Image (tube, rainbow, N blue to C red):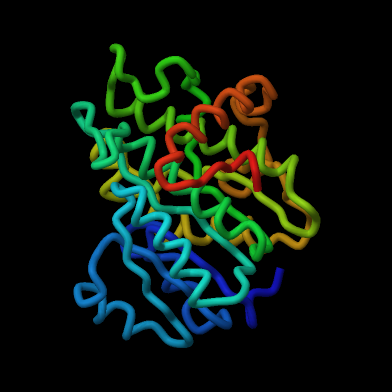
Amino acid sequence: MDLSDRTVVLTGATDGIGRATAVRLAGRVGHLVLHGPQPRAELAGFVESLPGHVTYLPADFGHLGQIAQLAADIREATERVDLLVNNAARPGAPRRELSVDGIEATLQINYLSTVVLSTSLRDRVGRIINMASATHATEHLDLNDLELAHGGYAAVTAYARSKLAIVTYTCWLAARLDPPTEAAAMHPGVIASSLLASMFAIEGQPPERGADNLLHVATLPSEINGRYFEERTPSRPNPEAEDPAVQDGLLDRTAELLAPIGVDPRHR
């Protein structure tokens, strides 16, 4: 997939893998649309340093309304999205936190943002890459307690569950996309970042490695719809992600959580 004249939307573009990816893409694509939680003024220096046609759109994913507004802003900024990279993420908090919408914050910022943007832009997107994590393989989707409200909360559990939800949603979505639109999920590698440091006492590879893995998968010329990648290698995800009953249950619960902003991914 040649990106030289394409429009790319990248969330979570101001730190870690996202920032490294933005630097890699700037000047090499037709239009680069970047998202971050910081106000425009705070990111002006970084954005202005990037070559090419770059648009920065801020949104705090701790507010469902701001995620929906970002989708509207993207639609206003570009008539097409050749590549959508849902990269924005936060680690699990040491103690369970709720968003302003009353939803477990890690689930909302990591997973629900992915669903809102993919759903809202589905009619004009070419390829969707949803950033997951190898930790998703260790988790289970308890659809009766998706937000870990009834015990068992831990930072890594919240993070891993949000990533399992992303992989499960990606498998569900891929089966419903009309060609040539595609969706895939990937683990970018164990990357040194503030996110990694906040949850794991291990060292990671440079963010540029994660960016290179991401762009390798995103630009593969072959069909990638429905696949899960461990870095650059197609792999089998957690079996729950491929279970139609789990997928349908997750989407039903997701629709309930997104009802306040009028987004129902099942009906697009």
Residue at 23% across, 27% down: 96
Observer-nearest residue: 169 or 17? Answer: 169
Relative image position of residue 6 (x, y in whole percent): 63, 77
The quadrant where residue 251 appears: top right
Observer-nearest residue: 97 or 259? Answer: 259
Residue at 58% across, 60% down: 121
With respect to residue 59, does 63 lie above or below?
above
Residue at 50% across, 84% down: 27
Relative image position of residue 249 (x, y in whole percent): 58, 23
Observer-nearest residue: 203 or 160? Answer: 160
For the question of whether residue 188 can be seen, the reply is: no
With respect to residue 109, does 220 lie above or below?
below
Looking at the rendering, in which quadrant would you find the N terminus? Answer: bottom right
Relative image position of residue 99 (x, y in whole percent): 26, 39
Residue at 45% across, 39% down: 259
The quadrant where residue 44 appears: bottom left
Q: Is residue 38 left or right of residue 204?
A: left
